[in-house]
Amino acid sequence: MTDVPQSIPERRVSVTAFDRIVIIFNPNSTGSAPEMAQELHDELTDRLPHMEVVLSPTEHAGHGRDLARAAASTGTPLIVSVSGDGGYNEVVDGAMKAGNRDVVCAVLAAGNANDHRRTTRESPLADAIVEGQVHRMDLLALTIGEGPEAQLRYAYSYNGVGLTPVVAVDLEKGSKGSLREIVTVVRTFARFRPFAIRLEDGTRSTFDSLLFANIAQMAKVATLSEDGNPEDGRFEVITVKHTAKWRVLGVALKAATRGLGPQPTATHYAFTTLKPTPVQLDGEVLELDPQTKVSVDIAPGALATIT
């Protein structure tokens, strides 16, 4: 298992020379990812005539992780994911698994929520790439299991247990988009049941939602915290203990209107699942077995990126 980075001396990095640019995208996307990838390729080729710019289409689910890891294994590449949050999660996780501190990742939003790009965008991506100004941001490191068999997965925006991943599962079944999306959320909320976990101190707690956030917003409109910052070396812990459904709905409405305000922060949070439990990493959902130990840690400045 790859060790979780603990410290990075510099957050802001001077202009970086990439040796190539790799654009990863899903050619069978129901959206405009293929067209957007081609347009970015053509613009960068024109504006950076001496730079190798490669289109790297995925062939199946999870392939983006493999492509990113292979691309990140040598040299000083910039890997651009033309995707939504789930596709970029694959690319970031794959790049981190390569263990190359010089790799840089970026995302061109082509999905449904695009939480990360929306909350971190500073300039049009092509302009930012041409300028080459790189900075570092924190990642969430999710360790699943213990010992030699433990798996380490990275997320750049949030990890969620409870209501959030359950809604995500239903959306991934094909109900994305405007009115259908609203109907999906309402339907899932109506049948949702709380979940119980055993905390690190041995106590058992029951939650409706448990979220570890590296950014201040998610799901397009929800403001999770007042001070969320992916460069502060901490993550926000947003908890909703089990309560009446109307209270949970009240929390959701508050997040969508006024925001949830200041939230407690941490660098480490651990628990053990008691039943099969879905967990969401950015836009990707994993199913955890019962009696699985889970640790969430901050990896400060682990990701070099362009926004």
Image (cartoon, rainbow, N blue to C red):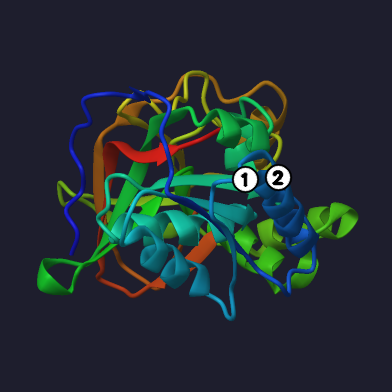
Q: Nearer the viewer, residue 114 or 267?
A: 114
Residue 270 in the image: x percent, y percent?
24, 49
At horizontal 57% and vertical 40% (from top left) the residue drawn is 116
Based on the displayed image, in which of its 4 quarters is residue 257 positioned? top right
The answer to whether marks 2 and 1 mark residues whose Cβ atoms lie closer than 8 Å is: yes
Residue 130 in the image: x percent, y percent?
59, 33
Q: Amino acid at mark 1?
A: Pro
- Give SS at disc 2: helix
In three-dimensional space, the C-alpha distance between marks 2 and 1, rounded to whole angstroms, equals 6 Å
Q: Amino acid at mark 2?
A: Asp
Q: Nearer the viewer, residue 27 or 149?
A: 27
Q: Residue furthest left?
A: 147
Q: Residue furthest bottom?
A: 60
How many numbered marks are there?
2
Residue 46 is tagged as: 2
- Give SS at disc 1: loop
In the image, taking residue 236 as reference, residue 116 lies left or right, namely right
Residue 99 is tagged as: none
At horizontal 54% and vertical 48% (from top left) the residue drawn is 51
Based on the displayed image, in which of its 4 quarters is residue 170 positioned? bottom right
In the image, taking residue 277 as reference, residue 10 lies left or right, namely left
At horizontal 71% and vertical 72% (from top left) the residue drawn is 27
**Image position of 266 with respect to 180: above or below:** above
Q: Quadrant of the N terminus?
A: bottom left
Residue 55 in the image: x percent, y percent?
61, 64
Q: Quadrant of the C terminus?
A: top right
Q: Residue furthest front?
A: 50
Q: Where is mark 1, residue-wise?
A: 49
Dot 1 crowding, Cα within 10 Å, few <14, some 14–19, many 20+: few
